[in-house]
Amino acid sequence: MSKSATLWSDAIYRLTRNKAAMFGAFILLILIASAALAPWIAPYSYSFQNLELGASPPSADHILGTDVLGRDLLSRILYGARISLLVGFVATGVALVIGVSWGIIAGYAGGKVDSIMMRIVDVLYGLPFIIFIILLMVIFGRNLWLLFGAIGAVEWLTMARIVRGQVMGLKNQEFVMAAKAMGVSNFSMFRKHLLPNILGPIAVYATLTIPQVMLLEGFLSFLGLGIQPPMSSWGTLIKDGVESMEEYSWLLIYPGITFTVTLFALNFFGDGLRDALDPKTTDN
Amino acid sequence: MINIFIKRLLLAVPVLLAVASLTFVLIKLAPGGPFDADKAVSPQVLKNLNEAYNLDASEWEQYIDYMSGILKGDFGPSFRFPGRSVSEMIATGLPVTFELAFYAILIALVIGVLSGVLAALKRNTYLDFIPMAIAMIGICVPTFLMGPLLVLIFGINLEVLPVSGWGQLPGDKILPSITLGFAYAAYIARLSRGGMLEVLNQDFIRTARAKGLTERNVVIKHAMQGGLIPVVSFLGPAIAGLLAGSFVVETIFQIPGLGRFYVEAAFNRDYTMILGTTIFFSAMIVFFNLLSDLAAMWLNPRSRD
Amino acid sequence: MRNFLFIFLIFLVSCSSSVTPVDDALDKQIFHFGNGSEPQGIDPHIVTGVPEHHILISLCEGLTIPNAFDDDNLPGAAESWSISDDGKTYIFKLRKNGRWSNGDPVTADDFVWSWKRILTASLGSQYPDMLYYLVGAQEYHTGVTDNFESVGVKAVDSHTLEVKLKAPTPFFTGLLSHYSTWPVHKETVLKFGSIDDRNGEWTRPGNFVCNGAFNLKSWELNNKIVVEKNPLYWDASTVKLNQIHYYPVSNVMTEDRMFRAGQLHVTSTLPSQKCPVYLEENNPDLRIDPYMGTYFYRLNTTNPYLNDVRVRKALAYSIDRKLLVDKVTKCGQIPAYSFTPPGSNGYEPTTFIPFDPELAKQLLIEAGFNSENKFPKLEILFNTNEDHRKIALAIQQMWQQNLGIEVELVNQDWKVYLSREMVGDFQVSRAGWIGDYEDPNTFLDLMRPNRGNNKTGWEDQNYDSLMARANSTNNQVERYKLLNEAEKILIDNMPIIPLYTYVRSYQLSPDIKGYNPHILDHHHPKFIYLERD
């Protein structure tokens, strides 16, 4: 266990030295905090309309301007953060749970079980999930949980592959064999020995999956299939912004920047995590 | 390797059948039918329509009918466009989407590999940072944002490129291809940089250099073969992603491809069209995944399962 | 390597033409038409939409055609007609020089066979009721009889068509400009299938034969349809256009950009946020034409809370229609105080719906709802569309503010929305109706009992008998009086809440002449030509 301890402290040291990753982490913290505190810090409710005002550029009353119904853009971006980040984390969580369980079982069991399980993954890899998601969204459109599940179902495959690879590598290491010889139950094995060691790659991949998920949600919103109003995510804000980008450019610029910056932050942080945990790929 | 190819090909058949069956079930679960229209259809007329399209038979019967049709290559008539068969519509849309995807992947490969290799060779210099920064932009700016922005700049403000169409006006294939390919160029740039870095650190490269071979020789003949394996493996999922991305790009630029057909078929409950395009997309994805896996295996005999 | 790419791009870019399609079309007399969506087909007896109409009007011709200069229809395939005194018998004299595009003469038998086709139930046409005004038509269509001789249409001789109606129908000639009454070429249809074959290939380019001003030249799915001038058309000398190119552009933003980039002469619509902008900058290409359509909300009267007429009126009286059209739709729409758009063929309804929040609150209290007995949450159903959402949001706020009623917005995909409306699974539902012909009957008929398009569950026998009486008289003045009475009953019972009268908003290139406003948005291409001032 001392092996993983130094690995961790090593990794943390490297991570904190990575300026891009730290910057990303900082941005993320601000975003998550703003999203969580949105009901208290947002100047207006996200649905409050001011029909007389209509769309207006940034002003003292509305720091980022208003949309065509007179709703404050800053508030909508803050509330949108809640939805987008929620989709990102929950859907990734779904992918995580399925993928990690699948990968651990397959990798640890080995042999025929592993063969069948990974064959299933291979097969599923070849399916046009996007097609099914579109169909599902068209049919059952208003269900947020379905959205989480559907998106999660797309992303778990790679997670399973990575985890299984890691587990296979670990399986044959001394400490695992020793634990087995001592009669440790499978469940304890997963929990105490394998899981801590694969936490690294899982964290990396999870951090890099969140932006994928958010892009996917945006893509669905653009086609009219994602989050349904009155809830609106950054994806729907961008979609609305694209439609008025010539007349009311601020409706596109601010949500667009927020979205892009968030994705940047997640990617930088994820890259940093990966570099920190895997010494071979650092730029030294 | 032929064995593996054949095995995978045979495996694809039940996969496609499963895809078709799953889609069939989903469609049948969907509320709203193909003949619902704003002007209410009288029960009499609805009955006639359902009869004409075999929708009055039991679900099981319809399923069997449809599946046996597919095995013969008959995807049935389109529900939304009387007089057109699904095969015919796929035949018009598929080449367009193919062409779009081809240009996109070409752009992605050329720009991606060139910048990635360059970045790897000139590591930690500006020639590394700048392409990688642009790559980051490509990954973080969604296609549905990039497309309209490009249209705004080049189509409306500068007026040098058409804002829509495919094959109608000269130059109308440029913006859609770039929009679709840019994100993949970004991924490929990062992958090839990473792959090249790993290979360039290895002993046999040092040996080659020590032997006095030119840098160009070293890079192209020795390094790239191994360094680009991640790129080749990525191609399979990339094609899948491109097909998905085509939905958005075809919508933005009004391109008459299969992606747009599919989205509209889903909205219009054109059952047969939905089934037909789903099966086709799946077949293409399976096929390309297979090709890219084989290519990766060929390039690196060590990557066996 | 970087340089290479740059040069390559510049090279590509400079290859693009600087002469726009619109410029190029001027000499060639080609009309570039933005058509909104890919047409389902071009079989006039099967299709149901507006994009299909735009194409069909250039390919086929009915007995009458729309007028570019005023509202009364002009002679089309029929050069003249006479109506009996009791208004129930029409004699149409067909043109001797009327030709199908393959040279065959257009005869009365063609019309008889065509109307038989659309009334053949197994064809599955969705507009057979257009011809239900004919004697025996409904019976034939619903299978009561299978003898077409019993239907009131006969070819007296090769160029004389006799039509017998059940009742005097003053709007009958107007009805004839709807494509469901247009003829199809019998030999061509039968060559590729039977009379009731929906999937016959007779509509393909190369096979298609019809009697209109243009011929079908090519059809690239989801890309472009091209029609070219038909030299055999009886009035070919009047037709100045050589070709029309129809583009099925479904994305309204893309269509707008295409127009501004000179790729289209006319758009099918306008992005709603562009309208106020174009209005303000006095954009000369902007067109806002009156349109015979009403945007309204359906109320499900079978719902226990909406069953009470006072509740329905309260809902109607607490909507500020002026605010809606001025601040939400912002494109010159007109607040509606009646179901039938005013001015439809001279009909002026005298109904009115006040904006009176106090009265509305009063009515709600009278109906038994107050602070102890709160009115339950209402659900507004609409199909997923930003414009409908904006209106629903505004009304949500109005009902909240003026009546204290909580409202939930539920948007569904188009097909789901339709199926829910059809089975009555809604409380309040957004709806729109465009007239099929220019007469108030096309609106008021909807709300009669047992009409498929009623969907509100409201049935009033007085209303029904007034409508029946109005449709059995030939005297237009008396008719309009009766229709107005019916309209009053409708507004007094409020099963539907009219919101505003539609307008047709679109962009039109100044090169296009002869594309004049028409209340039903019918523009016959033979009056259209290109000319640059």
Image: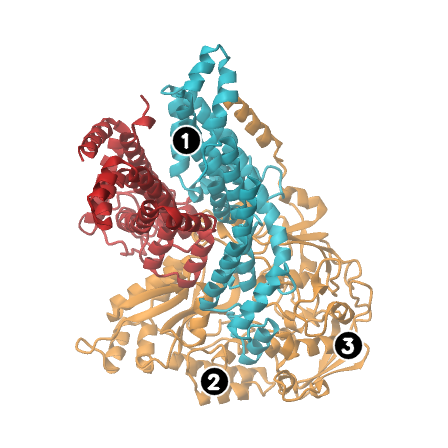
Chain colours: A red, B cyan, C orange
Residue position for label 2: C449
The residue lying toward the viewer, choosing from B21 and A56, is B21
Same subunit under labels 2 and 3? yes
In whole angstroms, how far apart are the C-alphas of marks 3 and 1? Answer: 73 Å
The amino acid at mark 3 is Ala
Locate residue C173, reporting x and y percent. 65, 76
Left or right: B198 in relation to C195? left
The residue lying toward the viewer, choosing from C201 and C282, is C201
Identify whether C488 is placed above or below B172: below
The amino acid at mark 1 is Arg
What kind of element bears circle 3?
Answer: helix
In whole angstroms, how far apart are the C-alphas of marks 2 and 1? Answer: 67 Å
Residue position for label 1: B190
Left or right: C316 in relation to C275? left
What kind of element bears circle 2?
Answer: loop
- Quadrant, the C terminus of chain C: top right
The amino acid at mark 2 is Pro
Left or right: A61 in relation to C275? left
